[in-house]
C-alpha cells in the first residue's frame, strides 16, 4: 500500500469519527499543555529567584551560621558582637562583617495612628550590613557603630515601608513605634530592583542590633554576614572566620558553617530544579492517561472496522500495511493533541509569567521534547491495537464482508 493511500485512509477515518477523535486528542492535549506549562513556569521562577538573589547580595557575600543541617540552632552565646569586629580585623580576606539578628511579622506603626500596624521584617545589624545586601541609602544615613554601642533607638526604613508610613512627607527625624517601642527614623534605603522580596511583599526595617535585641527580648545573634575582599578570597574568608570563632568559643557545643552566595545560588537552583521535575512528572501522568485513552479508542476501532480490514486484505493488503495504518492513526491523534497542547501550554505559561511579572521562559527544547514525547505515546499506546488488527485471521476478517 502506498504511503499516500495510507495517509488518505487515516484522514478519512479520523474525519468520519470527529467527536471521538476530538475527545481522544483532548486527553493528549491536556497532558502536553500541563507538562510544558509546569516546566516553563518552574524555569521562569528559578531564573527570577536566582537573578534576584544575585541582585540583592554582593557576589563576594558569605554568611557564617550554626550548622542547621545537624539540627542545631543559635543560642545566646553562639555569637557576640566582638566576633564580627575581630574577624574583620584579623582576617585579610574579610573586607566587611556584620552580626545579624532578625524577627518576622513585626508591628511597625506611627504614633497616635489608627491605621493598622504594618507587618515588617526587622533586621538588627551593624554598619557593614549594607555592603552585604548590596543596597545603598537614598536619604539620611545608615546605622553607625555609635548607634550599636549606645543601643540607639533609631531605624532605617526600606523604600516600601517609608512609602506606606509617610506617603506625603519626609520620614527623616519622625517617630515610629516598633512593637510599641519608639524609634526615630534616620534613613531610607534605595528602592531595590523588582525582586522576589517585593513580590512577596516583605518590608524591612533596619535597627542597631543592640536595639533589636531589646525589642525582640533576646540575646541571640542568628548569623554573621561578611563580604570578602574578592571572589577568589571567599573560601579563605570563610575558613578564617570559622577558625576565629572556634578559638573564641571553645566551649560551644554548636558547629559553625559558612556559605557563600554562589553556594546559595547552587542550592536554590537545585531545589527549584527538583521541584520542577517532580511537578512535571505529576503533570506527565495526565499525558499517560491520555495515551491510555488513545489505546482504548484504537481497540474499539479495530473491533468496529473488522469489515474494513477484511476488504483491505481481500485487495491484497499485507499484515504490515494494516499495522502501519492503525499505528499511523494513533500517532496522528497524539501529534494533533501534542500540537494543540503545545500552544495551550505555552500560552498558559506566558499568562502566568505576565501575572507574576516574570520574564517568560519557554525553552524550545521543552516544547520539542514534549512534542516528541507525544509521538512516542502514540507509538507506544498504538502498537498493541495495531498489532491486534494486523493479527486478525484473513478468514475471520473476510467473514464480515
Image (tube, rainbow, N blue to C red):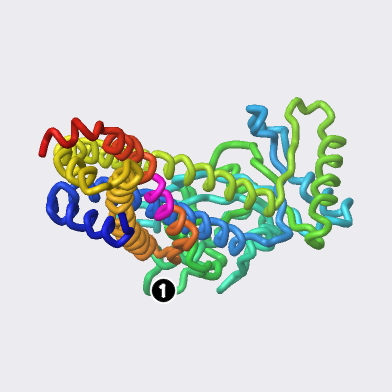
Q: Secondary structure at mark 1?
A: loop
Describe residue 227's horizontal placement relative to residue 266 as left or right: right
Camera-side residue: 116 or 369?
369
Residue 128 locus on image (x, y percent): 71, 59
**371 within the magenta span:** yes
Question: Residue 242's quadrant in the figure?
Answer: top right
Q: Which residues are magenta?
A: 370-376
Residue 118 seen in the current view: no
For label 1, count other residues whose C-alpha is less than 10 Å away and answer few (under 14), some (14-19) or many (20+): few
Residue 288 locus on image (x, y percent): 35, 39
**313, above or below 341, in the image:** above
In the picture of the structure, the residue carrying the numbered disc 1 is 169
Residue drawn at the location 58% of the way across and 54% of the way down: 207
Camera-side residue: 271 or 215?
271
Residue 185 seen in the current view: yes
Residue 40 locus on image (x, y percent): 43, 56
**94, above or below 194, in the image:** above
Residue drawn at the location 28% of the way across and 47% of the way down: 317
Quadrant where the image shows the C terminus = top left
**55 within the magenta span:** no
Dominant secondary structure, magenta: helix
Camera-side residue: 221 or 399?
399
Amino acid at each position: 500500500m502506498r504511503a499516500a493511500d495510507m495517509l488518505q485512509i487515516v484522514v478519512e477515518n479520523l474525519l468520519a469519527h470527529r467527536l471521538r477523535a476530538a475527545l481522544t486528542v483532548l486527553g493528549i492535549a491536556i497532558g502536553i499543555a500541563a507538562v510544558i506549562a509546569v516546566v516553563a513556569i518552574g524555569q521562569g521562577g528559578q531564573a527570577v529567584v536566582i537573578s534576584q538573589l544575585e541582585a540583592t547580595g554582593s557576589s563576594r557575600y558569605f554568611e557564617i551560621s550554626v550548622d542547621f543541617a545537624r539540627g542545631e540552632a543559635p543560642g545566646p552565646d553562639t555569637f557576640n558582637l566582638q566576633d564580627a569586629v575581630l574577624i574583620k580585623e584579623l582576617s585579610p580576606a574579610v573586607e566587611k562583617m556584620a552580626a545579624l539578628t532578625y524577627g518576622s511579622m513585626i508591628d511597625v506603626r506611627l504614633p497616635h495612628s489608627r491605621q493598622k500596624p504594618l507587618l515588617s521584617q526587622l533586621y538588627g545589624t551593624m554598619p557593614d550590613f549594607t555592603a552585604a545586601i548590596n543596597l545603598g541609602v537614598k536619604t539620611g544615613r545608615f546605622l553607625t557603630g555609635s548607634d550599636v554601642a549606645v543601643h540607639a533607638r533609631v531605624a532605617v526604613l526600606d523604600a516600601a515601608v517609608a512609602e506606606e508610613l509617610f506617603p506625603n512627607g519626609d520620614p527623616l527625624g519622625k517617630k515610629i513605634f516598633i512593637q510599641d517601642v519608639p524609634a526615630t527614623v534616620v534613613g531610607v534605603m534605595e528602592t531595590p530592583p523588582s525582586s522576589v522580596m517585593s513580590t512577596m511583599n516583605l518590608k524591612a526595617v533596619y535597627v542597631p542590633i543592640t536595639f533589636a535585641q531589646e525589642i525582640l527580648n533576646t540575646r541571640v545573634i542568628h548569623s554573621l554576614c561578611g563580604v570578602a575582599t574578592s571572589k577568589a578570597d571567599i573560601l579563605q574568608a570563610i575558613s578564617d572566620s570559622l577558625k576565629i570563632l572556634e578559638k573564641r568559643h571553645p566551649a560551644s557545643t554548636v558547629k559553625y558553617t559558612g556559605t557563600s552566595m554562589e553556594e546559595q545560588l547552587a542550592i536554590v537552583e537545585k531545589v527549584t530544579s527538583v521541584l520542577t521535575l517532580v511537578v512535571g512528572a505529576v503533570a506527565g501522568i495526565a499525558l499517560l492517561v491520555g495515551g491510555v485513552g488513545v489505546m482504548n479508542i484504537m481497540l474499539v476501532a479495530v473491533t468496529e472496522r473488522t469489515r474494513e480490514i477484511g476488504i483491505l486484505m481481500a485487495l491484497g493488503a499485507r499484515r504490515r500495511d494494516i499495522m502501519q495504518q492503525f499505528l499511523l492513526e494513533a500517532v496522528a491523534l497524539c501529534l494533533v493533541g501534542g500540537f494543540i497542547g503545545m500552544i495551550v501550554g505555552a500560552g498558559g505559561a506566558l499568562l502566568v509569567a505576565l501575572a507574576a511579572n516574570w520574564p517568560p521562559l519557554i525553552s524550545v527544547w521543552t516544547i520539542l521534547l514534549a512534542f516528541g514525547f507525544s509521538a512516542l505515546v502514540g507509538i507506544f499506546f498504538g502498537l498493541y491495537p495495531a498489532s491486534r488488527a494486523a493479527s486478525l485471521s484473513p478468514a475471520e476478517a473476510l467473514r464480515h464482508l
